[in-house]
C-alpha cells in the first residue's frame, strides 16, 4: 500500500480534502482508525478486570493516573478471540468526549486518504462488524476497512 | 497527600504486611492510595503478583533517569483505588552506583510531589537496612510506622532505629513523627507479654495502644496475593489493622483506652 | 532466602550524620546516573527511526507514541525548519521537532513525512518515520560516551540494534536552545 503519507506540515497544497488513518490488523484484516481521534498507541499494560461491565470490555488500565476503559475489539466486532502477543497494541482514542482503548492485533502504518478513495457503501454488509464500519478504501495491497468510532461504544460501555 | 513510611532495620517484623493491610483498608475506605516498594527484594511487588526481576517502570526508574516521569510508573493493584510503584532487583545496585551522591536522598520526595494530586495516601515499604532507599523514605514521609515484633530482643534493635531517626530528623531539617506498632504479638507467651510491657514502659505514648496479633491467615493471604483485610475482613489480624488505621486517622493512636472498652474487648 | 545487607557500614557515629546530610542536601543538582554497569544492567529503550537512523530513547522518558495529525499548530516565525509546529496535547501546546532534521548533519535527514510522534515526558515531541519495539540494551551493546560539546544529547552508540542512544534531558535542553525562544506554550 505504502502510498506515503502526505507531509505533516504541508498546509499550502490543499487540494482535495484528505483524512489520515492509522492502520491496524484484526484477525487478518486491515482496519483504519482516524488519526484525529487517536491519542496514543501503547503496548498492553496490566489490565484490571471490571466486574459487571459489558462483555466486550476487557477492563481498565491506569494511563498516567487516568483510568481508561479498554475494549476487546475482536469481541466487539464478532471476530474470533486471540491471545495477546508481542505485536498486540492498545490504541487510545477519544470520541464524543470519551476516552477508551481498543486492543488490536498490531499497528501497521499511517495513510492519507482523499475523499474519493473512500467507498461509503461498502460491501461488508453481511459482516458482524458492519455496524461499526463507515466505509472502505482500496489500497494497493488490499482493502482498508474504516472504523466508525462513534458506534464502537454505543450502548454505553464507558458509562461507569 | 499524606505519606506514611513503614520501616525498621530489623527484618521480618511485618513491614510489608503492614503496608499491604493499611493500603488495602485505605483504598476500601475510598482513599486513592499509592504503595511504594522500596525493597530491592521486592516482597511487596511480588505480593501483588509482579515480578521484581522484570525491568518495567518502577521505583528504579526514578533513580535511573533524570527526567523520569513519576506519573507514568504506577500499576493498579487490588482493591480498586490502590496503585503500586514496583521494586526491581536492579535497585540493589543503586547504593553502589550512586554511593552517597549529594541530594540523592530526595529523589523519592520529589517524585511523590509530582503525583501529590493523584493520591490521598502514599505508603512506603522499606527494606530492613539503612541505606539510600530507606533514607529516601524517611525524607519523604510525614509519619513513620515502626513495626516491632514483641519478642525478647526487640528493644535492642529499636534503639539503633531511634538513633537513625534522630539523625535523619536533623538532616532533613524537619521533625519526624513516628509511632511504634507492636506486631506478631503472641499474648499466650510470657516473652511476648513481657516484651510488650517493656516496650510501653520505655517508649510510652510512642507506642500504638493496640497490637497486631500473630495470625496465621496472613501467610494464607500472602499466598493468595491479596490483603488479609480483603480475604477475611473479620480475621483477628484484619481487625487489628483496621483499628490501627482508625487510630492513625483520628490521631488517637496512643491515648490509653478507656477502661470500659478494655474490659469489653 | 538470604538477603544481602547494604554497604552502609557506619551505623551510629559522625559518619552517618555526614552521610545523611549529603543525601538530603536540597541544593545538590540532580545528576544523571552513570551508565549501567555489569551484564545484569539493561537500559529499556524505544528504538525509533528517522532519516534512516535509529535513535534509542530511554523508555522512562517516553510519555506516549501517537500517529501525527495532518496538521500541527504553526511554528513561530523565524523558527528553524526542523521545528514542525506544535501539537495540542492534554491542553498544552507542545513543540514538535523533526528528529532527523534536528539531529543529523544537513543532507542526511531526508524529507520524510515523519508520520509518527513520540511525546517525551516534559515538553518536546519528536517526529519520526517508524517506531520499533522496545529493547533492553545491555552494557556490552552500547559504547557509552561522555557528554560532548557538539552532540550533548548523544549518550552512546548501541550496536544491536544499531542506534544512537539519546539522553532525553540533554536532548530537551539542546532543542530548547537550538529552537530559540518562542516555543513556550502560549
Ligand atoms: N501478624 C502476623 N501474624 C502472622 N504472620 C505474620 C504477621 N505479620 C507478618 N507475618 C508473616 O511474617 C513474614 C514476614 O512478614 P513481612 O514480610 O511483612 O515482614 P517484613 O518486615 O516486611 O520483612 P522484610 O524485612 O524481609 O521485608 C511473612 O511471611 C508474613 O506473612
Ligand atoms: Mg518487607
Image (tube, coloured by chain):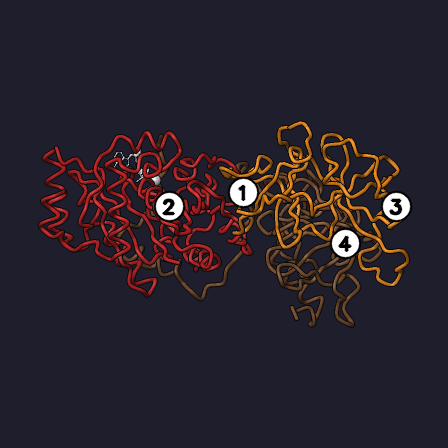
Q: Is residue A145 above or below residue A10?
A: above
* Nearer to us: label 2 or label 4: 2
Q: Position of residue C96 (x, y in %)?
A: 71, 60
In the rendered image of this protein, which colour is used for chain A?
orange
Distance between the alpha carbons at the discs numbered 2 and 4 = 50 Å
As drawn, the label of residue C100 is 4
Q: Position of residue C182 (x, y in %)?
A: 70, 72
Quadrant containing the C terminus of chain C is: bottom right
Neighbours of disc 3 within 10 Å: few (<14), some (14-19), many (20+): few
Q: Secondary structure at mark 4?
A: helix
Q: Position of residue A99 (x, y in %)?
A: 61, 50
Q: Chain of mark 1?
A: A
The residue beneath circle 2 is B28
In the rendered image of this protein, which colour is used for chain C?
brown
Distance between the alpha carbons at the discs numbered 3 and 2 = 53 Å
Q: Secondary structure at mark 3?
A: helix
Amino acid at each position: 500500500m505504502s502510498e506515503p503519507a502526505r507531509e505533516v506540515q504541508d498546509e499550502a497544497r490543499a487540494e482535495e480534502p484528505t483524512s489520515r488513518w492509522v492502520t491496524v490488523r484484526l484477525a487478518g484484516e486491515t482496519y483504519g482508525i482516524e488519526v484525529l481521534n487517536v491519542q496514543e498507541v501503547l503496548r498492553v499494560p496490566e489490565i484490571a478486570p471490571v466486574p459487571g461491565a459489558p462483555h466486550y470490555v476487557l477492563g481498565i488500565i491506569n494511563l498516567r493516573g487516568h483510568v481508561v476503559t479498554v475494549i476487546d475489539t475482536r469481541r466487539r466486532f464478532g471476530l474470533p478471540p486471540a491471545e495477546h502477543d508481542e505485536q498486540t497494541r492498545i490504541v487510545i482514542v477519544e470520541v464524543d468526549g470519551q476516552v477508551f482503548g481498543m486492543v488490536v492485533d498490531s499497528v501497521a502504518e499511517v495513510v492519507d486518504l482523499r475523499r474519493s478513495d473512500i467507498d461509503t457503501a461498502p460491501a461488508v454488509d453481511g459482516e458482524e462488524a458492519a455496524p461499526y464500519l463507515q466505509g472502505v478504501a482500496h489500497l494497493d495491497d488490499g482493502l482498508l476497512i474504516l472504523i466508525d468510532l462513534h458506534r464502537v461504544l454505543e450502548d454505553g460501555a464507558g458509562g461507569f | 497527600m499524606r505519606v506514611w513510611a513503614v520501616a525498621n532495620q530489623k527484618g521480618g517484623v511485618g513491614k510489608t504486611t503492614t503496608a499491604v493491610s493499611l493500603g488495602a483498608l485505605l483504598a476500601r475506605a475510598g482513599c486513592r492510595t499509592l504503595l511504594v516498594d522500596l525493597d530491592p527484594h521486592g516482597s511487596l511487588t511480588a505480593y501483588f503478583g509482579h515480578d521484581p526481576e522484570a525491568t518495567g517502570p518502577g521505583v528504579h526508574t526514578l533513580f535511573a533517569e533524570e527526567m523520569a516521569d513519576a506519573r507514568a510508573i504506577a500499576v493498579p493493584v487490588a482493591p480498586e483505588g490502590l496503585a503500586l510503584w514496583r521494586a526491581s532487583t536492579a535497585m540493589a545496585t543503586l547504593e553502589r552506583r550512586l554511593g552517597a551522591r549529594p541530594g540523592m536522598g530526595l529523589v523519592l520526595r520529589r517524585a511523590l510531589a509530582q503525583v501529590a494530586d493523584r493520591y490521598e495516601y502514599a505508603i512506603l515499604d522499606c527494606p530492613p537496612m539503612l541505606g539510600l532507599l530507606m533514607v529516601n523514605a524517611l525524607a519523604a514521609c510525614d509519619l513513620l510506622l515502626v513495626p516491632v515484633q514483641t519478642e525478647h530482643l526487640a528493644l535492642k534493635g529499636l534503639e539503633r532505629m531511634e538513633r537513625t531517626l534522630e539523625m535523619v530528623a536533623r538532616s532533613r531539617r524537619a521533625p519526624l513523627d513516628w509511632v511504634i506498632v507492636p506486631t506478631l504479638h503472641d499474648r499466650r507467651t510470657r516473652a511476648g507479654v513481657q516484651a510488650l510491657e517493656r516496650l510501653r514502659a520505655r517508649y510510652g505514648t510512642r507506642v500504638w495502644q493496640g497490637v497486631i496479633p500473630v495470625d496465621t491467615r496472613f501467610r494464607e493471604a500472602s499466598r493468595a496475593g491479596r490483603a488479609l483485610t480483603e480475604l477475611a475482613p473479620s480475621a483477628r489480624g484484619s481487625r487489628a489493622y483496621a483499628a490501627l488505621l482508625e487510630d492513625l486517622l483520628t490521631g488517637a493512636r496512643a491515648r490509653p483506652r478507656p477502661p470500659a472498652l478494655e474490659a469489653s474487648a | 532466602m538470604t538477603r544481602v545487607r547494604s554497604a552502609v557500614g557506619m551505623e551510629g557515629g559522625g559518619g552517618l550524620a555526614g552521610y545523611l546530610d549529603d543525601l538530603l542536601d536540597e541544593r545538590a543538582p540532580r545528576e544523571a546516573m552513570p551508565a549501567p554497569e555489569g551484564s545484569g544492567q539493561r537500559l529499556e529503550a524505544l528504538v525509533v527511526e528517522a532519516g534512516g537512523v535509529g535513535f534509542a530513547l530511554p523508555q522512562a522518558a517516553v510519555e506516549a507514541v501517537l500517529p501525527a495529525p495532518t496538521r500541527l499548530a504553526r511554528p513561530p516565525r523565524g523558527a528553524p525548519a526542523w521545528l514542525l509546529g506544535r501539537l495540542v496535547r492534554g491542553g498544552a501546546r507542545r513543540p514538535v521537532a523533526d528528529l532527523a532534521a534536528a539531529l543529523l548533519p544537513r543532507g542526511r535527514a531526508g524529507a520524510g513525512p515523519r508520520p509518527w510522534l513520540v511525546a517525551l515526558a516534559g515538553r518536546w515531541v519528536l517526529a519520526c518515520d517508524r517506531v520499533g519495539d522496545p529493547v533492553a540494551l545491555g552494557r556490552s551493546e552500547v559504547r557509552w560516551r561522555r557528554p560532548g560539546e557538539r552532540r550533548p544529547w548523544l549518550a552512546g552508540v548501541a550496536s544491536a540494534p544499531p542506534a544512537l542512544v539519546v539522553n532525553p534531558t540533554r536532548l530537551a535542553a539542546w532543542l530548547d536552545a537550538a529552537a530559540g525562544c518562542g516555543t513556550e506554550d502560549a
